[in-house]
């Protein structure tokens, strides 16, 4: 049960999967989440992989689902989370899902375009309605006192021209009515004035409500205008200007009867359109509500399918034996569960055929580092991993950090509050603080001195002994084997006796496993190193360690420094702030305390808790990383990232 | 002197109980090793911590620092010997 001290034992496995069963087996392994697949096709472009079409289909489905989600969010409908974890659907179901999504997509797009067209129509009719009602006012006025209007017209012309007034009683004026945004009205008038050289007459009236613009869909203030002119040329010019200013021109019949009829027709059409629009919206809501219930499930399913096909793209397709070959890292203790999952997958996809096979491989490669963690230990493991992931089977500092980190944090944060600190009056170093101190001091120094030869010599001596043992073993077995390779063997043996064979795979040396003779000869990573290099390396390490001892010991003084700072800060806050309030007597004191409490508490929170807390955290972490972990921790491993649906769904959170 | 020794023994026994005896009594489970380490480290840290403070108060490096006003108050309250 010493699995918390170092990484779990990992083994490289080979899986032979039948093509029909492959999908189901991978699905089961994904649910289990304890194998890490290796990419057996690293040089293959992602567009040339076997299952690129399936992946494309999945991405298409995801796109449709995203569109669906935006539409649902636009209408602010709630999206339901699935209670249980939906399984990855079978390949046949994928086609059904695709069809469903296609239908929904199509339907929704249709509804949207229809709704847009209807809305535009509705807005135009609304503008027309306002137009008619406003111009009605003009023409009524004109009917009531035609002379006044014409005089008005004349008057204006007189003013502007300053010239002769020509009577235009009885002359027919053409007109154009339209609607324009209010901001543009002034420039519009001015432009009309300039272009038509003052020969037009504009009347305008603001529409009081905000109406939706048919094109942009925004609600703006608009104005109804009537432009009176004479002649064809002016009409063209006015029309062009209206187009330029993007004013909506609406035809208005001159005859009051026709106008009234048109107005009534517009009203009825508006009513009809409102009904149709609301029906369209209802339909849209219904469609979206129905799909919102299943949206999350679909998203999870599609994610799983995509993950499975991505994994299957990493496999080697053995055409001769008609199966898929996969390589994966797995913990040794979980091999049974993996076998079970494979069997389940094979049965699920219609057993009868040969079930999938798991084959353990022996390799020299460094496996990934896998620690068994729970929520509590995961946090501290992250702190350690930030410095470096543990080398495979290296000791994991996390169990110790679990206690020492909170301890050091507490020391820096609180403790010297208990002791009033200031400089001692006469530091006599010759005074012994307690009897036997001299003895203890000498003992500590002797210990430190012993460390030097211990560190310097320990590793080389250990390696010499190990290699002697290995050399003896291999010479014995070599002599009992091929006599043809005698020359090679002799060279091999003499080389071994001269130098030291350093094995990069530390595991074998430490656990003293006797290697298979085949593997010894097949090693690619075997190095032959001179003894002198080992001595130099050890020398460097010893010096580093010795100097480190002194500097690290001094570094622990930061515990004192930080707690002192903390104590002083809290003292300051106490004296300067709170005491003022608490010092006063009577009712004034009570009120003063109340007032003073706010700045005191906010300063306390921000300075003492947050800032000092951050500082203590940082220094405790630094003490762990530098003063503790640098002494022994290499941290050159890589983490174990299993193929797990749970991890996949957690890291890309599907938020509502 | 005896009180010093007695207190020392009591606290050492207390933390020793937690750190040395208790780990053997942890029932088997997935977290047995982890709990054992936690107990040992915690008791070691706490005992050492307590020891430092206790020894410091037994043979202090310096006494309480009094301001002159406080010293005068004490002298008036407790008599001229102080």
Image (cartoon, coloured by chain):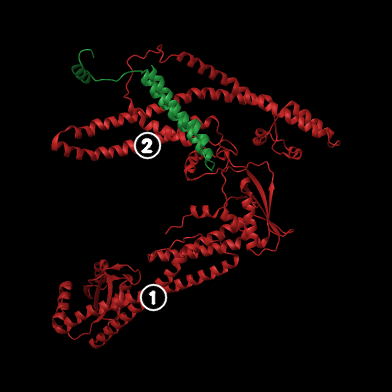
Chain colours: A red, B green
Give residue A455's quadrant in the image.
top right
Which residue is most to the bottom? A257
Q: Circle 2 is placed at which residue position?
A: A613
Disc 2 sits on a residue from what chain? A
Q: Nearer the viewer, mark 2 or mark 1?
A: 2
In the image, residue A206 sits, relative to residue A534, either above or below, namely below
Q: Residue at x 30, y 31 (%)?
A: A569
Quarter of the image where the N terminus of chain A is located: top right
Q: Secondary structure at mark 1?
A: helix
Numbered circle sitting on residue A280: 1
Report x, y in % for residue A267. 28, 82
Would residue A205 appear left or right of A467 to someone viewing this image?
left
Q: Secondary structure at mark 2?
A: helix
Numbered circle sitting on residue A230: none
Q: Residue at x 71, y 39 (%)?
A: A524
Report x, y in % for residue A18. 68, 60
Mark 2, Cα crowd under 10 Å, few <14 / some 14-19 / many 20+, is some
Report x, y in % for residue A173. 23, 82
Mark 1, Cα crowd under 10 Å, few <14 / some 14-19 / many 20+, is some
Q: Nearer the viewer, residue A290 or A253?
A: A290
Give residue A161's quadrant in the image.
bottom left
In the image, residue A70 sits, relative to residue A178, either above or below, namely above
Disc 1 sits on a residue from what chain? A
Whether residue A571 is visible:
yes
Q: Residue at x 54, y 19 (%)?
A: A447
Which residue is most to the top? A430
């Amino acid at each position: 049960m010493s699995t918390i001290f170092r990484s779990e034992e990992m083994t490289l496995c080979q899986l032979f999967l039948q093509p029909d069963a492959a999908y189901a087996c991978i699905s089961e392994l994904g649910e289990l989440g304890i194998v890490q697949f290796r990419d057996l096709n690293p040089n293959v472009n992602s567009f040339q992989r076997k299952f690129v079409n399936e992946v494309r289909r999945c991405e298409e489905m995801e796109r449709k689902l995203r569109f669906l989600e935006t539409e649902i969010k636009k209408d602010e409908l709630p999206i339901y989370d699935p209670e249980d974890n939906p399984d990855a659907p079978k390949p046949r179901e994928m086609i059904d899902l695709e069809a469903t999504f296609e239908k929904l997509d199509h339907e929704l797009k249709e509804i949207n375009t229809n709704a847009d067209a209807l809305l535009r129509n509705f807005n135009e009719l609304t503008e027309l309605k306002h137009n008619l009602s406003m111009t009605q006012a003009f023409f009524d006025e004109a009917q009531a006192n035609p002379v006044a209007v014409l005089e008005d017209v004349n008057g204006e012309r007189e003013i502007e021209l300053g010239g002769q007034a020509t009577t235009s009683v009885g002359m027919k004026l053409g007109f154009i009515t339209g609607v324009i945004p209010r901001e543009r009205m002034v420039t519009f008038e001015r432009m009309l004035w300039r272009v038509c050289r003052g020969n037009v007459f504009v009347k305008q009236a603001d529409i009081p409500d905000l109406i939706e613009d048919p094109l942009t869909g925004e609600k703006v203030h608009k104005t109804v205008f009537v432009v009176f002119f004479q002649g064809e040329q002016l009409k063209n010019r006015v029309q062009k200007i209206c187009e330029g200013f993007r004013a909506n021109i609406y035809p208005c019949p001159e005859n009051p009867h026709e106008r009234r009829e048109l107005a009534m027709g517009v009203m009825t059409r508006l009513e009809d359109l409102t009904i149709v629009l609301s029906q369209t919206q209802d339909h849209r809501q219904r469609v979206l509500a129905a799909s919102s219930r299943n949206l999350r499930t679909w998203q999870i399913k599609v994610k799983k399918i995509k993950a499975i096909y991505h994994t299957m793209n990493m496999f080697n397709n053995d055409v001769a034996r008609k199966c898929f070959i996969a390589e994966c890292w797995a913990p040794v203790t979980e091999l049974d569960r993996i076998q079970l999952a494979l069997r389940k997958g094979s049965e699920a996809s219609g057993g009868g055929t040969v079930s999938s096979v798991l084959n353990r491989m022996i390799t020299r490669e460094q496996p990934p580092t896998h620690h068994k963690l729970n929520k509590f230990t995961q946090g501290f493991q992250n702190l350690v991993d930030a410095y470096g992931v543990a080398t495979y089977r290296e000791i994991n500092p996390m169990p110790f950090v679990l206690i020492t980190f909170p301890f050091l944090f507490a020391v820096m944060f609180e403790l010297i509050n208990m002791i009033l600190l200031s400089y001692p009056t006469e530091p006599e170093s010759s005074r012994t603080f307690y009897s036997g101190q001299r003895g203890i001091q000498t003992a500590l120094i002797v210990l430190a001195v012993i460390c030097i030869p211990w560190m310097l010599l320990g590793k080389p001596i250990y390696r010499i002994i190990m290699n002697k043992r290995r050399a003896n073993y291999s010479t014995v077995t070599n002599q009992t084997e091929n006599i043809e390779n005698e020359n090679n063997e002799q060279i091999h043996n003499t080389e071994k006796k001269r130098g030291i064979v350093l094995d990069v795979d530390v595991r074998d040396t430490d656990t003293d496993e006797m290697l298979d003779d085949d593997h010894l000869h097949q090693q690619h990573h075997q190095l032959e190193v001179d003894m002198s290099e080992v001595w130099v390396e050890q020398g460097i390490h010893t010096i580093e360690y010795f100097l480190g001892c002194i500097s690290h010991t001094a570094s622990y003084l930061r515990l004192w420094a930080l707690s002192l700072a903390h104590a002083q800060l809290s003292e300051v806050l106490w004296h300067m702030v709170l005491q003022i309030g608490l010092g006063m007597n009577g009712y004034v004191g009570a009120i003063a305390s109340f007032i003073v409490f706010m700045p005191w508490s906010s300063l306390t929170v921000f300075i003492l808790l947050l800032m000092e807390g951050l500082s203590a955290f940082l220094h405790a972490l630094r003490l762990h990383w530098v003063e503790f972990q640098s002494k022994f921790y290499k941290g050159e491993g890589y983490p174990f990232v299993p193929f797990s649906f749970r991890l996949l769904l957690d890291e890309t959170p599907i938020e509502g | 002197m005896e009180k010093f020794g007695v207190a020392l023994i009591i606290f050492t026994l207390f933390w020793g109980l937690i750190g040395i005896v208790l780990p053997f009594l942890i029932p088997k489970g997935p977290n047995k090793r982890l709990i054992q380490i936690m107990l040992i480290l915690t008791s070691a840290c706490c005992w050492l911590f307590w020891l430092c403070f206790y020894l410091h108060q037994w043979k202090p490096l310096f006494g309480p620092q009094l301001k002159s006003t406080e010293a005068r108050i004490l002298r008036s309250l407790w008599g001229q010997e102080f």
